[in-house]
Image: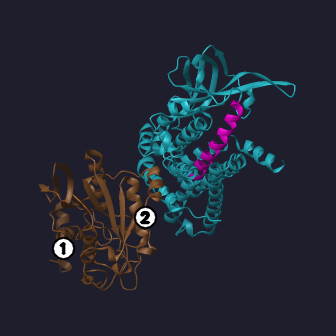
Amino acid sequence: MNIVVCIKQVPDTKGGVKFNPDGTLDRSAMLAIMNPDDKAGLEAALKIKDQYGATVTVITMGLPKADEVLREALAMGADNGILVTDRVLGGADTWATSSTLAGALKRLDYDLIITGRQAIDGDTAQVGPQLSEHLDIPVISYVQNLRIDGEYVVAERQFEDRYHLLRVKMPCLITALSELNSPRYMTPGGIFDAYDAEITVWGRQDLKEVDDSNIGLKGSPTQIAKASDKVRKGAGEVVNLDVPESVDYIMKKLRERHII
Amino acid sequence: MDFTLSKKHLLAQSLYRSFTENEVKPMAHEVDEKELFPRETVEKMARCGFMGIPVPKEYGGQGCDVLSYVMCVEELAKACGTTAVILSAHTSLCIDPILTYGTEQQKQNYIPDLAAGRKLGAFALTEPGAGTDAQGQQTKAVLDGEQWVLNGSKCFITNGKEADIYIIIAVTGTVEKRGKQSKEISAFIVEKGTPGFSFGTKEKKMGIRGSATYELIFDDCRIPKENLLGMKGKGFGIAMHTLDGGRIGIAAQALGLAEGAFESAVKYVKERKQFGRALGQFQNTQFQLAEMATKIEAAKMLVYKAALAKETQKTYSVEAAKAKFYASKTAMEVTEKAVQLHGGYGYIREYDVERMMRDAKITEIYEGTSEVQLMVISSDVLK
């Protein structure tokens, strides 16, 4: 069984956020981590590997330094790492990203593709489902529980007040929630091996069936008008009232501000 | 010359940090307060491969270098001195001498279980009448047919009772040196559960209170002849060489304690307000922190340099002694200053710095007091 996990190096929110003049993130200037949902996706793949046997390939698109996140994945137990990096791919929105990754995934044999639900930098949750469209395979998003049943994936898809139990034939794609599991730690030996391992590097010319109009900043329909760091809110107002009085108080405040 | 850590060491550091933050820090207060040996944490460390970091893969270890092991002890100590010394004694004082002096059979018998953390290790040299003066040993080992018979006792043994495998230093006879009779000392591997091997009192300590410190008692304890570690009569050299490595581990523990206390102090002085200003805005605080930061940096350089020396040199006594002397002194100074910066709260047991100051003191004492380190360093200077 071949599992491909799409992971992303995202800015560590503890380290502060920096922007380029065009409003995109200045990733080279920020501390970086593996996106938490992707890490849960990787753990799900590694669990399947432990249980049933599988080859787990991790793939990421990003700056050359994004190889760090691939090595972290190898240190956790992934078998192969592929870095898709090229200047012409920079500044990609979700459409250009999914087009690019699909071009890379078309070169691979896979039974199951796992992505995180969403990345903590963009928070769009679009790349996973878009990939399934590009590759013309079924998708189960928001997966909170997962098992393999022969040629099928049986997954719980989280819903607001319930979950849907879905049984889907592979090849398919799932997007993982952080709730899916607690990712394992790397091991020191795994880290040393990961830095001895070869990472496959692919550029624009290695992508299959991708049009130039669908990649990079030029291929991105989303244009960022303005970006700024989080604006700090005031301390707010604390009132101690019982429940009926609280309701009255909040209603009064909402009316005052013409919100209702 | 390059002072930057390699990418793999940085990634290992991030692993140790997240492990410490999630698994060690939440337990640290309780471990100290209840004098609780953190067995669960040791099991978690075992699952992550921490119990055999510098052990070659052929013996079931992680196959990493000394620096990556030392960094692990350092990061653990930032949150919990107890957890750090458990790992240091296990790795430096038990695994290392077996790897260095053991026969192939001994390595095959003991290292895989120790490196995987299925078994815990300890080392016993100190006796009531023989601490720094190792020649004062009273514990005896006598060969009786195919067995060595051990009699005597050891004290202040880290990981005592909790450990499964013990390196025991004992007197095996007398030899004549320069016309004087002196004790012949040898090293042995003894397993817990061997008849005649029992544990005495558990020590009640000022710091590292979760670490199990026991008296070991040998009463006609018979071990197989092949459990002699290294050559007969070479035990003193084995013990000294083992302690050279151990001192790097303790230096890393001291460094971590200093860093942990420093981080707590920095956080505290930013939040705590007096006379309408955060403590960090007073120049006295700023100068204190500047001095602490500089000493920590200097200690780190010595500790990492000693780790690299152990990796690449045959002997590293002087590097280890300098690292331990300076890092433990720094740990004491920095933790004391951190308590002072916390004011009254620093004296309250709920605050980490109070525990760290108590934990720091032992780093100036065990595995060779600071005075012994100065003897090692000065004899090198004057040789």
Membership of B241 in magenta stretch = yes
Q: Nearer the viewer, residue B158 or B189?
A: B189
To which chain does the residue with label 2 belong?
A
Q: Badge 1: few (under 14), some or many (20 or more) residues near its Cα, within 10 Å?
A: few
Q: Main secondary structure of the magenta part?
A: helix
| Amino acid on which the number 1 mark rests in the picture | Lys
| Amino acid on which the number 2 mark rests in the picture | Glu
Estimate the x, y position of residue B113 in percent, counting from the top left.
47, 34
Element under disc 2: helix
Measured along the vertical axis of the image, is residue B126 above or below residue A70?
A: above
Q: Is residue B88 left or right of residue A243?
A: right
| Range drawn in magenta | B234-256
To which chain does the residue with label 1 belong?
A
Residue B290 occupies quadrant: bottom right
Residue A114 occupies quadrant: bottom left
Rendered shade, chain A: brown
Give the residue pinned by disc 2. Answer: A68
Q: Is residue A14 visible?
A: no
Q: Is residue B275 visible?
A: yes
Estimate the x, y position of residue B133 in percent, counting from the top left.
74, 32
Give the residue pinned by disc 1. Answer: A252
Q: Nearer the viewer, residue B154 or A223?
A: A223
